């Protein structure tokens, strides 16, 4: 991992990986959603509304996977002080929050015709809403420390502590009686019919590739932002002290 | 011990402590955080008459009996055990409300032990089955899924 501590090496890798992930992910996601919209039979109980499955489930996966990524990056920052770790965590936060919001919105729309309600305060729905708020808190904290020049460790600790919500979301429908049904896909197998399962898997893979592409894009933008700031800072110092002999090292 | 290993140990220790705290908190919450009572829980520890609670379970097959007034239905909710709770509800039924499916009812027990529901929510199970199997009963469709996709 440490060979990518050099941002140049990381950027040359990201340069060709970003469009590859983004466009393949977009094509696969749209293809899987279109297949789900057109080519899948209505569910025996839910009817046509089963088609929202192909957006709801990948979004939920990325909402939780995003926070897992933040937690892993945070641990890498605290333990190995990897210079890209805080950038990666900041880059993940916004798309992770977006997919969490999509998950909550599609779930609510789905809940109205199937359960008969837009929202209930059961374990699964509440813990997912808490995840959305955790993302908002993380983004505010990481931006504040980035702008005000505080330590990136504060956001990293928050990222690790917030990870406790992920197993709670996962287990919420097993530990507690909830309106949301228990998991359909477990280690023992799947209770989703194969005609739904394959486009669902394609959608999950496609959304994940797209997510990876967006995260790389945002990491490149954040690195560029840091380099611009470092250059401006150096220039400002040069103007103040034109005869300064020692050049100030770029922090990026 | 290198500083890096010290930090690794500290972060791992912190993670273990956080996970343990979360598990203990959720474990102690397990009875309070339930969204509804199962029939066996309601029979074992009945809530006070008139106290607003939720009852969740399966609609017993053959138990839905529409009343002569046209908007009231009576049915029986079963859980994982043999205990059952009779329910009475007046109002519009959700689309997924069928015999053998899951239901969550808001309401309260009356003096005669009948659960007077003020609102019904349908609960979907974890099975997703296309409509080609519509002729099958819900439990038969579930069996079909078990045999074809290899569920546990």
Image (spheres, coloured by chain):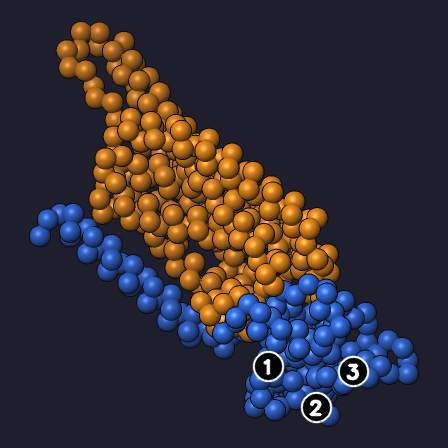
Q: Chain of mark 2?
A: B
Q: Which mark is residue B113?
A: 2
Are both tags, 2 and 3, on one chain?
yes
The picture places residue A138, in percent across and down from the top left corner, at: 42, 45
Q: Chain of mark 1?
A: B
- Foreground of the two, A201 or B28: A201
Left or right? Give the position of B107 relative to A127: right
User: Element at badge 1?
Assistant: loop
Kindly report the distance in space between the C-alpha atoms of the residues bearing marks 2 and 1: 15 Å
Left or right? Give the position of A244 relative to A226: left
- Foreground of the two, A25 or A225: A25
The picture places residue A195, in percent across and down from the top left corner, at: 62, 58
Are both tags, 1 and 3, on one chain?
yes
Q: Nearer the viewer, mark 2 or mark 1?
A: 1
Q: Which mark is residue B64?
A: 3
Chain A rendered in what hue? orange
Residue A140 seen in the figure? no
């Amino acid at each position: 991992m440490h060979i990518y501590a050099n941002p140049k090496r990381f950027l040359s890798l990201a340069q060709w990986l970003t469009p590859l992930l983004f466009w393949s992910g977009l094509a696969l996601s749209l293809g899987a959603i279109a297949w789900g919209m057109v080519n899948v039979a209505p569910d025996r109980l839910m009817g046509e509304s089963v088609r929202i499955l192909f957006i709801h489930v990948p979004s939920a996966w990325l909402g939780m996977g995003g926070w897992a990524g933040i937690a892993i990056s945070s641990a890498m920052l605290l333990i190995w002080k990897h210079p890209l770790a805080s950038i990666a965590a900041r880059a993940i936060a916004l798309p992770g929050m977006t997919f969490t919001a999509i998950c909550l919105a599609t779930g609510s729309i789905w809940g109205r015709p199937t359960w008969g309600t837009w929202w209930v305060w059961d374990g699964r729905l509440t813990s997912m809403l808490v995840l959305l708020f955790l993302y908002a808190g993380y983004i505010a904290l990481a931006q504040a420390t980035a702008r005000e020049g505080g330590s990136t460790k504060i956001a990293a600790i928050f990222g690790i502590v917030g990870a406790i919500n992920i197993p709670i979301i996962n287990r919420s429908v097993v530990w507690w009686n909830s309106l949301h049904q228990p998991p359909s896909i477990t280690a023992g197998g799947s209770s989703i019919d194969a005609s739904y399962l394959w486009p669902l898997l394609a959608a999950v893979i496609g959304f994940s590739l797209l997510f990876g592409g967006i995260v790389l894009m945002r990491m490149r933008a954040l690195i560029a932002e840091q380099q611009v700031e470092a250059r401006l800072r150096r220039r400002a110092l040069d103007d103040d002290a034109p005869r300064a002999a020692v050049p100030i090292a770029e922090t990026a | 011990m290198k500083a890096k290993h010290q930090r690794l140990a500290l972060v791992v220790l912190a993670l273990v402590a956080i996970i343990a705290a979360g598990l203990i908190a959720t474990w102690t919450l397990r009875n309070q955080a339930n969204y509804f009572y199962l029939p066996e829980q309601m029979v074992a520890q009945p809530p006070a008459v008139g106290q607003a609670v939720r009852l969740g379970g399966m609609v017993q097959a053959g138990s839905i009996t529409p009343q002569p007034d046209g908007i009231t239905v009576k049915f029986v909710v079963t859980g994982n055990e043999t205990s059952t709770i009779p329910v009475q509800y007046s109002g519009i039924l959700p689309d997924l409300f069928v015999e053998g499916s899951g239901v969550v009812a808001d309401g309260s027990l009356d003096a005669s032990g009948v659960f007077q529901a003020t609102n019904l929510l349908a609960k979907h199970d974890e099975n997703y089955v296309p409509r080609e199997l519509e002729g099958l009963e819900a439990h038969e469709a579930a069996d079909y899924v078990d045999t074809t996709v290899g569920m546990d």
